[in-house]
Amino acid sequence: MPSVPYDDDAPLLADLMPWSVAPPRLGRGWPTAPDEASLRARWDALMKAEGPDREALFEPTRSRTPHSAVGQLPGRHTGTEKLARTTGPCAEPVRVLQAPFDEQWLIPDHRLIDAARPELWRVADERQVFVVEAPAVPANSSAGPLLLASSVLPLIRPGRIRPLYRRPGATEPNLAPGLLDHLTDRLGHRPDAADVLAWALVAVRPGLTVPLTADPELWSRGVELGRRVLWLMRRDGDRPKLPGGRRPYVRSPLPSRPVTVHYDRDEETLQVDDGRISPVPPEAWDFEVGGVRVLEQWFAVRVGGAVDPGTLEAIRPTTWPQTWTSELLELITVLALLAELRPQRDELTVKTPITATELRRAGVLPVPDTARRPASVLDHQEEGPEGQFTLL
């Protein structure tokens, strides 16, 4: 984070990106998994069960039971009849950010999700970027990123989610009205919404304040760095690579059913039972978000965690899928490259700040209440419960 004084009157992220949504709450673990095949098998098992058996497998809550009547998720095409009598196929699984830097799969069926946050699904498209407040960092833990960015819908709790755009197609930035105009006056050129997000990713500090600068050179340097961070976090487009000789490889094949994971710091080797991956830089292994090592958490989901037999969540891969190895190698690369950027982030020093007081004098703050609410979608039609349509 930039070395700025704590009394610099920096604006809050909540004011710069005013519309935020609480993360979705599933209410049950089985609609998500690290692989698609398990989700389809879980759905098939649910469909084969009847009556009380189906209800028990479903794991009902006060918000959802097999008898709940709910509409489709925006942009999805699933049945809207009550789950207790449905017989249709599994909805096509979609990618979600289940944990920091851990993309998994979700059955996007509104009937399975306690609180789906439809307003997020309405603005999810290939141009959207979801900004996620990372979990709080415990005392005495190493610093990790305070913000995450994702191209797919995040399920990380408990932090707020701030979409970069309020409408599909990137047509309305989720920024304080007038902010881009004020930055244009102070910087001498017009930034766009992605520039503001890029700056925020590298400038944000504890308390989720975002020091802004009126120095065009510093702004450009921070935005360039932030766009690199954004690209690595989103992990779309070209695959990131470490220079030759530093790229992680599978030195010994990973077992079909790994149980233990160990990191050898001296050898820079990740040992998965008898399998070996190297080189794995210590910075990648030590990379934390919210006080939790990202790689350890990633492995725990796939190799550990006892579940009750007979539950849908117990339906898992019987062998280690090759796709997980590919995802692991890419994750190691991403974490190592992000760790390399930390010194450059620390060098950013805001000496000519654009303060919250200045933004208030310019009429940018406080933001109007309408900017904190979702944009209306009056031309958007969605199927409600039992096949009825609702005009929103």
Image (spheres, grey):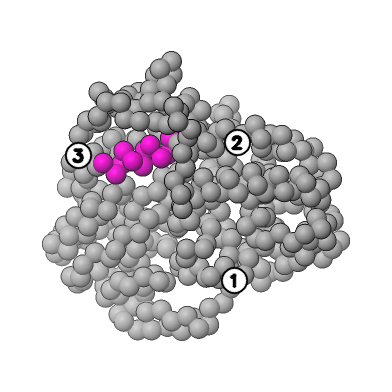
Earlier sequence position, callout 2 versus callout 1: 1
Asked if 380 appears above or below 210 in the picture, the reply is below
- Residue at 28% across / 49% down in the picture? 35
Q: Which residue is mark 1?
A: 171
Is 308 placed left or right of 228 in the picture?
left
- Residue at 38% across / 61% down in the picture? 114
Q: What amino acid type is highlighted by mark number 2?
A: Leu
Q: Which residues are the magenta region?
A: 322-332
The picture places residue 263, in percent across and down from the top left corner, at: 39, 23
Q: CA distance from mark 2 to mark 1?
A: 31 Å
Q: Quadrant of the N terminus?
A: top right
Q: Quadrant of residue 91?
A: bottom left
Earlier sequence position, callout 1 versus callout 3: 1
Whether the residues at callouts 2 and 1 have beta carbons within 8 Å, the answer is: no
The picture places residue 123, in percent across and down from the top left corner, at: 50, 68
Earlier sequence position, callout 3 versus callout 2: 3
- Residue at 74% across / 35% down in the picture? 3
Q: Is residue 326 magenta?
A: yes
Q: What amino acid type is highlighted by mark number 3?
A: Thr
Q: Secondary structure at mark 2?
A: loop
Asked if 31 appears above or below 140 in the picture, the reply is below
Q: Which mark is residue 341?
A: 2
Q: Is residue 2 magenta?
A: no
Q: Which residue is mark 3?
A: 319
Asked if 206 appears above or below 93 in the picture, the reply is above
Q: CA distance from mark 1 to mark 3?
A: 44 Å
Q: CA distance from mark 3 to mark 2?
A: 36 Å
Is 389 placed left or right of 144 in the picture?
left
Q: Secondary structure at mark 1?
A: loop
